[in-house]
Image: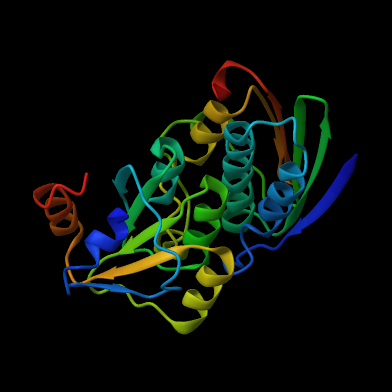
Amino acid sequence: MVKECQIIAGNFELAGRASSELKRFLKTQSHMPKSFISRVCSASYEAEINIVIHAVGGFMTYEAKDHEVKLYFYDDGPGIADIKQAMQRGYSTASPIAHMNGFGAGMGLDNIRRLSDQMIIESSPRGTRLTLIFKVGVKDE
Amino acid sequence: MSNTQILLKDSNYRLLTNPSFLPDFKHIFATDLLSTAIKHIKNETALITLIVSQTTLSLALMLDLEVLIVTKDAVVNEAFIMKANEQGLCVIYANYLTHEVIKDIYQRGIL
């Protein structure tokens, strides 16, 4: 099952809408532990906020199968100039508006990496694609 | 009696949401940086923060938070309270600064 949710750049009022929809769906999957759902949705929310803060817009798709969830985030740029640097905790190019909303301190990608079981980032000036894979396992005990 | 009810016995705390929903909490975590909350919050934690925005509500939803304590000087509007009620979140306004809330919870033996 694959679903798609739009993410609007700069709109903090709607930030979290895609992750909320994901959470609603995952809660219907009775075989998935609550802690797993919380882990997936927390990472999803961080990734969604990243698009709101940094990109010119994008979307998320998700698919769930058995004990695995895959999330794909796509945005339309401007891309991450130096992924290695962006992965460093504390590095941030976020605006003051992001700070006012409690984000933009350079912890997002590190949080996402820690919460997910697999994280793949591909980026160019035309946009960034983030793939996250989650499997029910020891992180959820 | 839940510990939110005990907290509200002090008139420096004001319940902003549905009075019939006063859940317990087992931990508190104070931050104005929501990514830190994502990183560290455990189950049944009350979040103490000055950040009152849609991002706080979304965070609460993602982390299954039930209690939010907003500290002195936070501006809470009706739309926020309405959304918090829809979401089933207990929001308490504290006429204390963040460290004073923590100190009070400790001194009264609430946790």
Which of B97 and B22 lies nearest the eye of the viewer?
B22
Residue B30, image x, y percentages: 29, 50
- Residue name at image x 63 percent, y 18 percent: A137
Side of B75 where A34 appears, left or right: right
- Seen from the viewer's position, the closer of residues A132 and A57 is A132
**In the image, what residue occupies the spot 62% across and 44% down?**
A47
Quadrant holding the C terminus of chain B: top left
- Give the x, y percent position of residue A69: 76, 31
Q: Is A93 on the left-hand or right-hand side of B102?
A: right
x then y, percent, for residue A63: 83, 37
Q: Left or right: where does residue B29 sit relative to residue A52?
A: left
Residue found farthest to the front? B1
A57, above or below A141, in the image: below
Residue A88 found in image quarter: top left
Quadrant in the picture for the N terminus of chain B: bottom left
Q: Residue furthest right?
A: A1
Which residue is most to the left? B107
Question: Does A77 sit left or right of A140 as displayed?
Answer: right
Can residue A77 be seen in the rendering of this structure? Answer: no
